[in-house]
Image (spheres, rainbow, N blue to C red):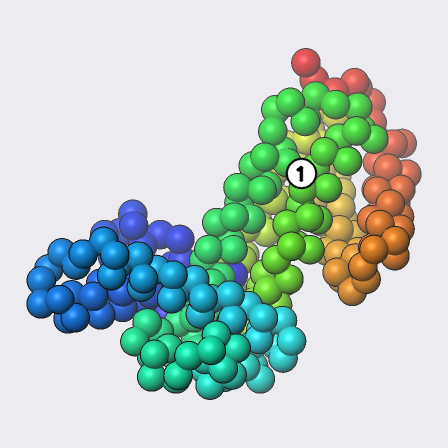
Amino acid sequence: MPGTRMGKNSEKGTKSPAAAATATTTAADTGTAAPPRRRQARGERRISQLLAAAAGVFCRTGYASASTNAIAREAGVSPGTLYQYFPNKEAIAIELGGQLLQRAHETHGQAFSPENLQRPLPELLDAVLDPVIAFNCENPAFWALMHGTGVPGIAQEHEELHTGLLTRIETVLRDFCPQAAAHEITHTSNMILGIFKSSLDLILAHEGDERAAYTAELKTVLLRYLEPMITTAPPH
């Protein structure tokens, strides 16, 4: 999570590789510029099927070892069918990564809602961490794509996501620690994000009670780290 940035195609008036392939395929099949909705919907379902298959392959083998043939097998289609929608593995990763990044942005926005930021620190940690952890657990391909793909578009968008999350954390800390210097806020925010990412590796590597235990440990670590710094009640 190519020369264009993911998630910005509609703003630039261009189409994603999958959308362009759907339009080209359906238009060629019908000989018209506006394909019937039924055929268009079929193309959208096929794209979703291919992206779901790619997510499974990327999680099991990693991006570098994945292949279009493996993705096609996972989806139960021929390689030729896959190439109607995606020219290569990188295009699949960009499309999938773009969708997951958009959902990650939405999750972060909900987690850092004004209502959540008015909670006392222990409740705030629950309200912020639970949906973000749930998103990563429900979408393991996100972690696989955001780390180690080497795809420029994904790396750029992931860096923007990281920067945005860091800014959100800094904003919260300024409210809770109004006496802290700017460099202290920056250092603490980077430490919080580093602790979270390291802990997320452990959380994703386990399931059930073990996953819940590591999640609880993460919250305990952050609570004990932050409590001595808090100099004011949450804003109202």
Q: Residue furthest front?
A: 38
In this view, the residue in front, 78 or 6, is 78
Query: With 187 as the anchor, is 24 left or right in this view?
Result: left
| Residue name at image x 49 percent, y 82 percent | 73
| Residue name at image x 68 percent, y 31 percent | 172
State whether residue 12 appears in this view: yes
- Counting from the top left corner in percent of width and height, residue 41 is at 30, 57
Query: With 156 as the anchor, is 218 left or right in this view?
Result: right
Q: Quadrant of residue 225?
A: top right
Dot 1 lies on which element? helix
State whether residue 153 appears in this view: no
- Counting from the top left corner in percent of width and height, residue 223 is at 86, 37
- Residue that mark 1 sits on: 169
Q: Quadrant of residue 88?
A: bottom left
Three-letter residue code for mark 1:
Ile
- Quadrant where the C terminus sits is top right
| Residue name at image x 61 percent, y 57 percent | 139
